[in-house]
Image: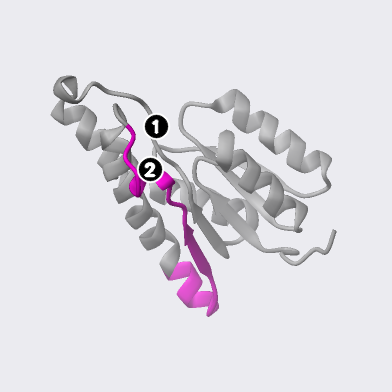
Amino acid sequence: MVQRLQNQVVLVTGGARRVGRAISLALAGAGARVVVNYNTSKAEAADTVREIERQGSRAVAVEADVSQPDEVKKLVAAAEKEFGGVDILVNNAGLFAPFEWDKITEADWDRFMNVNLKSQFFCAQAVAAGMKRRGRGAIVNIASLGGLMVWPSYIPYGVS
């Protein structure tokens, strides 16, 4: 495979499972060094890192709740310490869970908005200074068809 991302450092939020894992593996396959962010999926993150290393690339798993600005700063600091900076940010982290519309709490609603929406802002801000300093960088925000067609019981997901 052509190593189009050779030596580029990519931070993938929610990079340990499902779509995030596929993104992490594909980017590593293109030559990137990958920071696999996770919040609750430590075992899956370790497995993703092992698979990336098996492919011949480098990776590190970093735990952080990307809905919390202080944790995002620590996540980016860990990426900078391990690899020297973040060249590409892939904002992929998201909550996906059903709720009965009349039973969802404000705290649940806020959690969806914070993880699925505000985290993209927090992460972009956290990597921006380094990207400006290096004169390059890219930010990719992942969205879902759930934003175009809201599924019953998944309203907070679709709105966010």
Specify whether 76 is left or right of 43. Answer: left
Q: Which badge, 1 or 2, is on the more N-terminal residue?
A: 1
Q: Which residue is mark 1?
A: 96
Q: Which image quarter holds the C terminus?
A: top left
Q: Which residue is mark 2?
A: 146
Specify whether 132 is left or right of 53. Answer: left
Residue 150, picture quadrant? top left
Give the residue type at disc 1: Phe
Residue at 56% x, 26% y is 42
Give the residue type at disc 2: Gly
Specify whether 101 is left or right of 38. Answer: left
Q: Is residue 91 above or below residue 40?
A: below
Which tag is nearer the camera, tag 1 or tag 2? 2
Q: Is residue 100 above or below residue 8?
A: above
State yes or no: discs 1 and 2 in contact (Cβ < 8 Å). Answer: yes
Q: How is the image coloured?
A: one colour
- The region drawn magenta spans 129-151
Q: Which image quarter holds the N terminus?
A: bottom right
Decide whether residue 148 is among the magenta residues: yes
Where residue 77 appears, x then y in whole percent? 49, 52
